[in-house]
Image: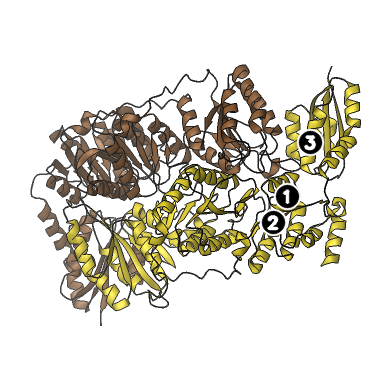
Chain colours: A brown, B yellow
Amino acid sequence: MPVIKYEIRAGAYFDSVLLMHLQRALAGLDGIIDAGVVMATPANLDLMLQSELLPSQAEIANPEDLLIVLRAQDEHHAESALAMVDELIASRRSETHSEFRPKSLEAAMRMSPDAGFVLISVPGRYAAGVAKDALRGCRHVFLYSDNVPIEEELELKQIGKEEGLLVMGPDCGTSIVNGIGLGFANRVRRGGIGLVGAAGTGLQAVSSRIHSIGEGISHAIGTGGRDLRSEIGGITALQAINLFARDPMTKVIVLVSKPPHPEVATRLLMACQNCGKPVVVNFMGYGPPAPKMGNLYFTANFDETAEVAVRLLREGQNSQIENEAHTGSYPPGRKYVRGLFSGGSLANEALRALQSILTPVYSNIAKDDASQLTDPVRTQANTILDLGEDEFTVGRLHPMMDNDLRLRLLEQEASDPEVAVILMDLVLGEGAHPDPASEFAPAIERARRVHQVEVVVVVIGTDQDPQGLEEQRQQLSDAGARIFDNVSDAVTSISRRMVFREVEEYKRVNLDSLTATVQAINVGLETFYESLTEQGVETVQVDWKPPAGGNEQLMSILRKMRE
Amino acid sequence: MPVIKYEIRAGAYFDSVLLMHLQRALAGLDGIIDAGVVMATPANLDLMLQSELLPSQAEIANPEDLLIVLRAQDEHHAESALAMVDELIASRRSETHSEFRPKSLEAAMRMSPDAGFVLISVPGRYAAGVAKDALRGCRHVFLYSDNVPIEEELELKQIGKEEGLLVMGPDCGTSIVNGIGLGFANRVRRGGIGLVGAAGTGLQAVSSRIHSIGEGISHAIGTGGRDLRSEIGGITALQAINLFARDPMTKVIVLVSKPPHPEVATRLLMACQNCGKPVVVNFMGYGPPAPKMGNLYFTANFDETAEVAVRLLREGQNSQIENEAHTGSYPPGRKYVRGLFSGGSLANEALRALQSILTPVYSNIAKDDASQLTDPVRTQANTILDLGEDEFTVGRLHPMMDNDLRLRLLEQEASDPEVAVILMDLVLGEGAHPDPASEFAPAIERARRVHQVEVVVVVIGTDQDPQGLEEQRQQLSDAGARIFDNVSDAVTSISRRMVFREVEEYKRVNLDSLTATVQAINVGLETFYESLTEQGVETVQVDWKPPAGGNEQLMSILRKMRE
């Protein structure tokens, strides 16, 4: 008759590698059927319950407590296994501690003044403190720890931004620096593709695929999963893009992340647009406005991301990036785009394309409240109006048939001194106005001449349409409009001429700090120390213990004394 | 000194073509500077205000009232122009009424028994009534009218579903049937691509582009913008996909729409997966799980949609669709997929891929509340678990390092009698477990042998990884796992073997009704009558007037009397 025995060790800190080894050692003892060794968090207790390893008396354990549970053949075997716990812990510890190890990060940094990277994988509540010490010591941080509060992440990244140091993480699984994998990383050849990723296994999947199709990567910078949230604003990702823009080895940049906060996405894509290299963007689940906008290439999954990057690398696309001036093309003070669309789907494409590179953009057909126009007939900042929407067509012909409304709005928007460009569509075909260009041409000319406002027109039609595609294009073009076949080309062209909001001032990360021989300090999981050592990296392992034995109050006093 | 004069005509119905002509005629009169002729809806009043055509006294007009406003050089010219309104209306009406016109749709259907299509563009509140009459007469409906209540749309489409009739719309801008454009349509050559679109100008942009690259379309079926909402459930789109599946001329299907309701998207994509032809899907702003899943190809904008469709047509991809059996591959009753992932990004890809073809799918990393697991450690229906999430890694090694948790869950999920497949990842590389396959192989074998549960593994790694990519794959494969390089191929393969939820029973739309010579009846805008006539279509124009002069109460009595 099997029995279950347990032990709770209150508030004790144990490295999770040690917990795994302890569990395995216990499970391997004579007469033991199953063993569980966990910190007693609600999720862990629930999992223990599912494994039939949670006696109801043990449910009183707190998240800070270590819970050891054994299912054994009988009472005797259970008791003697529990009695061996301390011995098993001591023996595991002695196995791994042959060489001298500094007791603190400060000591390790003194020992290893050229170690440019500090890997941190201590429990979340201690991680930010260790990371701050590393930044104070002018080292880049690879912060594997999760469960780090977001305010602490922001504080660390702001230091990083001011000091030109990378804070990769928290909850960063993967980076590859100068050929060396930090955390979880596949062994891939070096090459011309630079990766930025807020997605850990995303970076692994993309880098593995790049390797398997025969190319390689320059560096892969993990940012942690929350870097592209609005609270953080993509600090690490922006640093990485800037690094790759300057790195001569990197010819193509890849950006992989779960969908960023929309404003952060826009900021990042603006930075990418200005970086002078092709950038392959996979925002996992983000619906891109086009497969390509200028030097930005949007992809749907990791394989496609790798394949497009390799294709661009091989085609040498980076030499083809047009370096049109991004400023000064529109008169000073004229900064907004106003879209006057007759086609709802074209308006939708334009809205999405514009939102990917400008902010804010409002519309009467916006999906999110923040972008919704409060009054559908009053434009503000950048605006896309779909004039075929229900509210405009009660007792009024559709704007494809009757140009009156758009002609009035064209004049009205052009006379707004903050407007730089008017973007519109002209849809030909059956049922549409027989000669729309003849009515728009004078209005376009007036917008250009009188108001110095550019008019960009997306013309949809065929050579067989009753209005005549070429004749319509010619009339518009003679009036001074710029003509495009599709929305994304039109928006890309507009964005090239816009005055971009200045990217915030960052202290640049020193490129040499990435291309020098990697030396590292590891604080936390032994596994990462072993991995670095196997990769030939000179690494110092810190024999880390939580300050004050994990006592929060004492820790806070110690911290204050040091500051 | 210019003066403004106005007139309100209460509750009068006027065709919007007539309103446009009246406005133009008034604006062209001697001494008139500007004119506005609109139904006095809030949006129209606001637009009039912006054009300085809204005297404050006129703001009392109701949405059902016609508002005529003139800005004139002086009182005299304004007064004499207003006096001419009735005359201008009468002269416009006499211009267009040369031939005999039936006064009702019923009369028109008797006149033209072979007219298969009724185009309806009367004001929204009358449109459903006319459409119901057309369906009663066994005609397909092209419903251009907008502002039709969604309950009425549902009622119409349910009739269409039962009778095998298409209800294209409401708010449907575009269809092309047998080479004839209904509503707004570009003139494009005929060919092997069939279009389904809940996006009007989307269909125009895609069909124009297909034409311009040298191919053509079989038919284009507009569904109206709300067809893919949950209330309607994609009735018209499903009818159209089924039509194209049976149509021998159609080799490639294109589906264009604003992002559907997630469940409707899944249902449509399931229908597309089963249609036996390649389908190019552009859900405008939908983040696809992959560029390709089986016979589904996802695109980002209209040009790419056209280009991919043409490429598939030219490659003759339809012959390559694997017609694997979709049923019976898993034991009866075993219907669910459970995903046990160590990599968050891979879990995310799997969740999105699975959600595109199965419903419901739950996850601990779902973005929407509906898909969020209530308890992250308890699976339900189809579930994707990301076991690297914070809740699982407190005092526990990451599942890439320690397989214990996944091994326990693999056994647990496999012993659930409703589970058909377990999907998992195995990520190799630095920092990861030195030989994970050796631990998973026995568990996989047990799942297969004991529980008859299939195990599908996505292996991420390179030939240089310390674990050895081939050795790991071999061990898993020897244990009976099916191995894939990426998530979307794995999910596609799973979906091929799943028992699909039956597509609801629809009465099939008769294919011949689309390929016969088009004859039509037009109720509403003259423009569409002219367009059809120019295209050589035998068309009857109904001289439509709102029933009971637009009096709602009387209309309702009349309707009851007829039923």
Compared with residue A332, is residue B440 higher up or lower down, i.e. above or below?
A: below
Q: Is residue B282 left or right of residue B321?
A: right
Residue B503 position in % (x across, y down): 53, 68
Q: Pointers 3 and 1 in contact (CB under 8 A)?
A: no
Q: Chain of mark 2?
A: B
Q: Residue at x 52, y 65 (%)?
A: B246
Instruction: Tell me the crowding category of disc 3: few under 14, some 14 to 19, or many 20 or more residues within 10 angstroms, Cα based.
Output: some
Q: Is residue A242 visible?
A: yes
Q: CA distance from mark 3 to mark 1?
A: 17 Å
Instruction: Tell me the crowding category of disc 1: few under 14, some 14 to 19, or many 20 or more residues within 10 angstroms, Cα based.
Output: many
Mark carried by residue B121 = 1
Q: Is residue B395 left or right of residue B528?
A: left
Q: Residue at x 61, y 31 (%)?
A: A380
Q: Earlier in the sequence, mark 3 or mark 1?
A: 3
Q: Earlier in the sequence, mark 2 or mark 3?
A: 3
Could you tell me the amino acid type at mark 2? Gln
Q: Pointers 2 and 3 in contact (CB under 8 A)?
A: no
Q: CA distance from mark 2 to mark 3?
A: 28 Å
Pointer 2: what residue? B519
Q: Name the front one of labels 2 and 3.
A: 2
Q: Is residue B71 left or right of residue B508?
A: right
In the foreground, B1 or A501 = B1
Residue A283 position in % (x across, y down): 40, 45
In the foreground, A492 or B180 = B180
Labels in figure, total: 3
- Please tell me in which quadrant of the rendered image residue B114 appears: bottom right
Instruction: Tell me the crowding category of disc 2: few under 14, some 14 to 19, or many 20 or more residues within 10 angstroms, Cα based.
Output: some
Pointer 3: what residue? B21
Q: CA distance from mark 1 to mark 2?
A: 17 Å
